[in-house]
Amino acid sequence: MSDQNAARSASTIMNVRELATYLRLSEAKVYRMANSGSVPGFRVGKSWRFKKDMIDDWIQRQVKSI
């Protein structure tokens, strides 16, 4: 992967459906996690959005805490 593609991939922004697929969770679970603040995300109007690089960092922190 080129540096430009790697940077683009890291800055990818996902919606709830995409994050649910990425994490292999239900959309309802992702909404609950987002609303409780247990997963890093932000709102655009009434919609949740998630930066892939922040999610990947969050996953690494979850793995290290096990």
Image (cartoon, grey):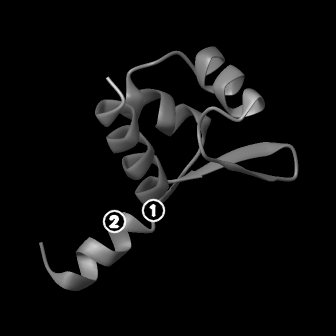
Binning the other alpha carbons within 10 Å of mark 1 as few (below 14), some (14 to 19) or many (20 upward) gives: few
Question: Contact, CB < 8 Å: mark 1 with mark 2?
Answer: yes
Q: Quadrant of residue 46?
A: top right
* Residue at the spot 20% in from the left edge and 83% down from the top edge: 3
* Residue at the spot 65% in from the left edge and 48% down from the top edge: 41
In terms of secondary structure, where does tag 2 sit? helix
* Residue at the spot 45% in from the left edge and 62% down from the top edge: 12
Residue 65's spot in the image, x, y percent?
A: 36, 30
Residue situated in front as seen by the camera: 23 or 18: 23
6 shown above or below 35: below
Q: Which mark is residue 12?
A: 1
Position of 13 with respect to 1 (left or right) is right
Amino acid type at image mark 2: Ser
* Residue at the spot 30% in from the left edge and 35% down from the top edge: 64
Residue 15's spot in the image, x, y percent?
A: 59, 44
Position of 29 with respect to 64 (left or right) is right
Position of 48 with respect to 19 (left or right) is right
Q: Which mark is residue 9?
A: 2
